[in-house]
Amino acid sequence: MSTHRRKDLLLLNDKLFVMAIFSQLVIMILIFSCSFGVYVWNKKRDADQKVQSNFEDWEPRLTEAVYLNSITSSWEMSKIPVVQNFKSSLLINGYPSDVFVENCDLASLQSAKKFPLKLGELKLKQCLFIQRKPDELFAAAYWAAALALISVLLTGLIWLLARSLFKRRLLEPLILSMEKEAKDAAIGKMASQIAHDVRSPLAALKILMRDTYGLQEEKRVLLQSAVGRIQDIANNVLPNRKSKLKKRSSVTRELISNLLETLISEKRVQYRDLLQLEIDIELSKHSYAAFADIEVSDFSRAISNIIDNAVEALESKAGYVRVRLECPSSSKIRIEVEDNGKGIPARLLPDITKERVSVDKVGGSGLGLHFVRKSIEKLGGRLKFKSEIGAGTTVQLELKRAETPAWFAQFIPIREGISVAVVDDDAAIHKVWSSRFNSIRAKERGIELLHFISPAEIDKELSKRKTHFDLYLVDYEFVGSETNGLDWIVENKLEKTALLVTSRFEENQLRQKCQVRSVQLVPKLLSAYVPFEIIEKMPMVATNPPLQD
C-alpha cells in the first residue's frame, strides 16, 4: 500500500469519527431539547391546573374584597390582605408567582395569566393577574444545559479514546495486513513469472540430459544435480504451492509425474544439508500421460513417508534414493522408491506394514508404513517390498490408471511432409522442439519446422501463405503481447491442429478453458517426454479453416 493511500485511509478514519461525534451531539441536543420542552409543558400544565383550582376556591373572597376596596379605597388593590393570602397559597402549592389586581384592559400585563372577577352577574372592572416567577424554569434550564454540556464533553472524550483505540488495535493492524498482502501478491506474481521463465530453459536442459550418457560419470551426476536444483527452485518459488496441494483433500484426477516431481523437489530442499545424498526421479517413456484418481494429501504423505524411510536407512546419510514412474500396462501405474541403504531383515518383511512394527528406528512408532499401506489400498492400489541386507530396499506402489482428461495431449501426431509452426517467445523452447524433431529425422521425412516468437509474427507469415500449417505448438504467455496463445488459437479456429504448450498447465482455470474450447494442452516442463506418434494420415489437417487471400 502506498504512503498516499495509507494517509487517505487514516484521514477517512478521522472523518468518520468526526461525523460520528457530530451526529451524536446533534442527537443529544435534540433529545435534551425535546425532553426540556416536555418538562416545561408538563410544568405549565400542572401549574395552570393548580392556579385554576386555587382561583376557583378563592374567587368569592377575592371578588368581595376587590369590590369593597374599590368602594373604600382602603388598600392598594395588590396589597389587599385576601390577595396576599391567595399569593401565599400559590406559593405553598408550588407555584411562586406575583399577583396583581388591575384594570382588565391593562396592556402591560397581557403576558400574565388573567382571571376576570365577577360579583354574581356583575363584572368588575378589575381582573386578577398572575405572573409566574421564572426562577424555577431558569434553574431547570441551567441544569439541563449543564447536563447537556457535560454529556457532550464526556461523549467527545469517549469518542476520542475510542478513535485512538480503534486506530491502534484495529486500523493500523489492518493497514499492516493489507500492506503485507499487497507485498506478498507482488512477490507471488514475480515468483510465478520467474518460475515460468525458468521452466522453459529447464525443459531444454532435460532434453540435453537424455544425451549425456557419453559423459564421464562425475560430470553426468553434476549435471543431473544442477538440473534437479533448478527444478527445485522453479517448483518452490511458486507462492503457496505446497499449502495448496495439502488443502486438496478430495479425490481428484492428477498427473502423477507432476506430483512426483513436486514431491522430489520438496525432499531435496528438506535434505539439502546432506551433501552426499542423491534424490532423483526417473520417468519412463510411457509415463508421460499417467493420470490417477487420488487424494492428493494422502498420496503425497504416503510417498513422503517412503522417501523419509529410505533416507533414514542410508548409512551415514550417504547414498541415493531413486523414484521411478512407469506404466507396465494401459491400466496400471507403478511407482518404485529405491535406496541403497542397509535393507530390511527378511523376517520383518511380511509384517512391515502392520501397525506398531518398526525397523531399528529410534523413537519410531511403526505407524508410517501402516498409513502408507492403508492410503494405497484405499485408492485401489497395492504395496510391495523388496529388500536385501546391505544392498538396499525397493518399495513398489501400483495404482489404477485413470482415463486421460480431454484437455491433455497424450501425444503429438506426426506424418511425413507436414509443416509445423512453433510459436514461443523463449529461445530455449525452440531448441527443445528442434532437438525433438531432429531425433525423428524430420528433414528426411520432409517435415518443415518454422519458428516464431509472437502471434503477430506468425500472423504476418500466415498472411503470405495459401494454406495453414499442419501443426501448431503455441505458448500461452508472450511478453509484451496482449494476446495469449489460447485466445490466438480460438480466434484462428485452430482447435484441431494446435497444441497449447505452457508451464501454467497446473492452473485449473486454464484447464477448464481448454476443456470448454476443445484445445489440448502440453505441460512445457514435460515437453521432453511427450511422445511423437508417427501416423499415415492426419485427419485433423482437413479441419483447418481456409486462409483468406
Image: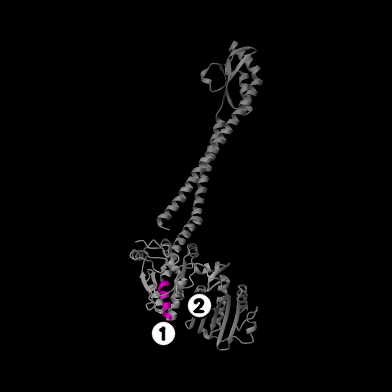
Kindly identify the amino acid type of the residue bearing the numbered disc 2: His
- Residue 337 vs 478, above or below: the answer is below
Image location of residue 352, percent across then percent down: 63, 82
Q: Secondary structure at mark 1?
A: helix
Q: Residue at x 61, y 20 (%)?
A: 83
**Towards the viewer: 396 or 344:** 396
Q: Give the number of the disc on residue 286.
A: 2
- For label 1, count other residues whose C-alpha is less than 10 Å away and answer few (under 14), some (14-19) or many (20+): few
Q: Residue at x 53, y 17 (%)?
A: 106
First to last magenta residue range: 198-213
Say left or right for 444 vs 395: left
Query: First in sequence: mark 1 or mark 2?
Result: 1
For discs 1 and 2, the disc positioned in front in the rendered view: 2
CA distance for labels 1 and 2: 28 Å
Task: Say if residue 159 shows up in the picture.
Answer: yes
Q: Does the magenta run of residues contain 106?
A: no
Say left or right for 198 vs 95: left
Quarter-of-image position of residue 119: top right
Image location of residue 13, percent across then percent down: 47, 51
Q: Does the magenta run of residues contain 208?
A: yes
Q: Residue at x 41, y 57 (%)?
A: 2
Image location of residue 59, percent across then percent down: 64, 18
Q: Give the number of the disc on residue 219.
A: 1
| Quadrant position of the N terminus in the picture | bottom left
